[in-house]
């Protein structure tokens, strides 16, 4: 085992939040090293370059590591449909670029309905807003200012909105007829060149990575600038254990996946950004003297309160071409008419009705998103002609409840390519979330009819839903009894070990988490820069008071 010099900060994970932490720290000369168990993915490896790109999306470019089974992945047992990418850029390489902020109400759900397991975030929207602004400016987003359902923010943060196309205009007209709120979406997709990245060319294949750099994935939005600042990024570096001595994190031991050699990295501060499954997995694997149940887990909360979002998909077809396969996928627009809890619905929380675009011809034949497949042989051409280019995807993304028994643990019976235990996921959909999803499907079908759809097909309530968004397993809070970290991302038991990714979310909202994950990373970095002495001397800023000057 080799040990090199001590760094100021060790960041584990090179995804959206990890990239944000590294870049913002290094702006001010902080000496940062980042360990990432994956590698760079070159744009030439994206499915864009395959004639059968739509089929490739379900094989080597699959979201699910259990399907890919690549050496950089680790297996997930139990609820196995958990989507993540281990690479520089993390899962943002696969994301569609939809970039909504959480709403002020999302930070106070414990106060709103008080159901068991739900707590308020220890921060407010207003506290996070300046870091949302920094993140938006760094990543590069497009959108339309003025949504009345959000607090005002600087208009200059956005580039011109992505053109809604025939698809977006048709759906907007239907929502207008119903009197439901809608707005063009913010997307981490640039419509003007930025930082050497090219503007979106509307190819529509965003979920397969973007070879132009138009999509604001972390590998192009954060990492070129972080590397230019001098951040040391070690790829193929699988962290085995975070090391602790005398109540203080001292660094980490990692395995070089290419050679099998073990190395130790020493750092004064450690920031963990491994996603909602990878982060608790590593904390549990780091059990050691004084931390028998894993790091910062004496209360047994590491890995608990896993959230995925509630999901359902509705495919709609029209009697005319609407060219849904053209344009940045992201989301042309969204409807949040039913976002907040309704008093008479019989459940709490709400959802975003999100308009997606279509894919190409192969997806049309393979059933699009809800499994309506074209028949083989006779009838195939007739089906295809009625469905291709006439399709609109609408899906509901509901806020699921944080439930303690929905959790990540270790499964030593299955191991990754380095011999480390798999993550095990237990997940059961609460009855509240089933009711919410069923309600959401009804509203989407209602909207589809208002738009003029002549045919619809839906998935129904997905039980359990796919794990695209992995949140809440190391949540932040106001005290060690109900959370893993304080409001400044410091773990209660090891104050110079911070967690700054989606696992820190106290609740998941009813919308995509990437924007908030990035803002949390920015905020964590700024806190370290301004309050490093407190972190290094193991002083915890009181969770219910603002840090001076922050």
Image: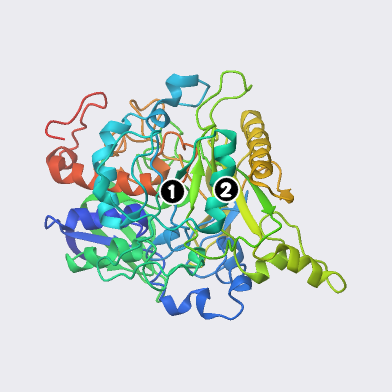
Q: How crowded is the residue under tag 2: few (<14 C-alpha within 10 Å), some, or many (20+)? A: many
Query: Which mark, by number, is residue 171?
Result: 2
On screen, residue 273 versus residue 178, left or right, reads: left
Q: Quadrant of residue 198?
A: bottom left
Is the residue 346 above or below the residue 418 in the image? above
Taking depth in this image into account, of 511 and 70 the one nearest to the observer is: 511
Residue 486 seen from this side: no
In this rendering, the count of numbered labels is 2
Q: Position of residue 466 (x, y in %)?
A: 60, 49
Query: Which mark, by number, is residue 185?
Result: 1
Q: Residue at x 79, y 72 (%)?
A: 381
CB of mark 2 within 8 Å of CB of mark 1?
Answer: no
Q: Nearer the viewer, mark 2 or mark 1?
A: 2
On screen, residue 490 versus residue 180, left or right, reads: left
Q: Residue at x 61, y 41 (%)?
A: 427
Q: Residue at x 56, y 40 (%)?
A: 175
Disc 1 is placed on an element classified as loop
Cα distance in 3D space between marks 2 and 1:
13 Å
Disc 2 is placed on an element classified as helix
Taking depth in this image into account, of 262 and 445 the one nearest to the observer is: 445
Quarter of the image containing the N terminus?
bottom left
Q: Position of residue 115 (x, y in %)?
A: 53, 21
Q: Position of residue 309 (x, y in %)?
A: 54, 41
From this viewpoint, which residue is outermost toward the right?
378
Residue 311 seen from this side: yes
Quarter of the image containing the C terminus?
top left
């Amino acid at each position: 085992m080799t040990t090199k010099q001590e760094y100021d900060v060790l960041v584990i994970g090179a995804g959206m939040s990890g990239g944000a932490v590294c870049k913002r720290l290094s702006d001010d000369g902080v000496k940062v090293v980042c360990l990432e168990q994956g590698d760079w993915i070159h744009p030439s490896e994206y499915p864009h370059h395959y004639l059968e790109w739509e089929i490739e999306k379900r094989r080597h470019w699959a979201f699910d590591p259990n399907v890919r089974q690549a050496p950089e992945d680790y297996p997930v047992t139990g609820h196995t449909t958990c989507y993540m990418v281990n690479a520089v850029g993390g899962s943002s390489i696969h994301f569609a670029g939809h970039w909504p902020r959480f709403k002020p109400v999302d930070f106070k759900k414990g106060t709103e309905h008080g159901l068991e397991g739900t707590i308020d975030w220890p921060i407010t929207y207003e506290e996070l807003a300046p870091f949302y602004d920094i993140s938006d400016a760094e990543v590069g987003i497009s959108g339309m200012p003025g949504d009345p359902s959000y607090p005002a923010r600087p208009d200059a943060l956005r580039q011109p909105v992505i053109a809604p196309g025939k698809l977006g205009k048709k759906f907007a007209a239907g929502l207008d007829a119903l009197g439901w709120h809608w707005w063009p979406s913010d997307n981490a997709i640039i419509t003007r060149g930025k930082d050497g990245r090219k503007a979106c060319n509307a190819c529509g294949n965003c979920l397969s990575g973007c070879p132009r750099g138009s999509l604001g994935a972390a590998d192009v939005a954060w990492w070129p600038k972080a590397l230019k600042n001098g951040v040391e990024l070690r790829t193929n570096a699988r962290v085995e254990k975070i090391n602790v001595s005398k109540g203080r994190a001292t660094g980490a031991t990692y395995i070089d996946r290419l050679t099998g050699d073990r190395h130790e990295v020493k750092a004064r501060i450690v920031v963990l950004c491994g996603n909602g499954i990878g982060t608790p997995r590593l904390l549990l694997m780091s059990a050691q003297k004084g931390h028998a149940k894993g790091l910062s887990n004496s209360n047994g909360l590491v890995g608990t309160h896993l959230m995925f979002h509630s999901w359902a998909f509705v495919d709609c077809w029209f009697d005319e071409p609407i060219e849904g396969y053209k344009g940045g996928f992201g989301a042309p627009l969204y409807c949040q008419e039913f976002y907040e809890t309704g008093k008479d619905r019989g459940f709490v929380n709400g959802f975003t009705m999100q308009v997606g675009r279509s894919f190409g011809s192969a997806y049309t034949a393979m059933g699009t998103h809800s499994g309506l497949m074209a028949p083989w042989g006779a009838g195939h051409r007739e089906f295809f002609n009625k469905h291709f280019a006439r399709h609109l995807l609408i899906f509901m993304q509901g806020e699921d409840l944080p439930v303690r028994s929905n959790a990540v643990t270790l499964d030593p019976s299955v191991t990754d390519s380095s011999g480390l235990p798999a993550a095990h996921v237990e997940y059961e959909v609460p009855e509240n979330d089933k009711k919410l999803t069923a309600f959401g499907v009804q509203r989407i079908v209602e909207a589809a009819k208002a738009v003029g759809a002549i045919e619809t097909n839906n998935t129904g309530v997905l039980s359990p839903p796919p794990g695209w968004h992995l949140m809440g397993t190391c949540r932040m809070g106001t005290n060690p009894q109900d959370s893993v970290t304080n409001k400044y991302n410091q773990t209660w038991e090891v104050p110079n070990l911070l967690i700054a990714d989606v696992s820190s979310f106290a609740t998941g909202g009813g919308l995509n988490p990437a924007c908030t994950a990035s803002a949390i990373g920015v905020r964590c970095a700024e806190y370290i820069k301004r309050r490093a002495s407190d972190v290094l001397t193991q002083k915890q800023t009181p969770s219910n008071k603002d840090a001076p000057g922050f």
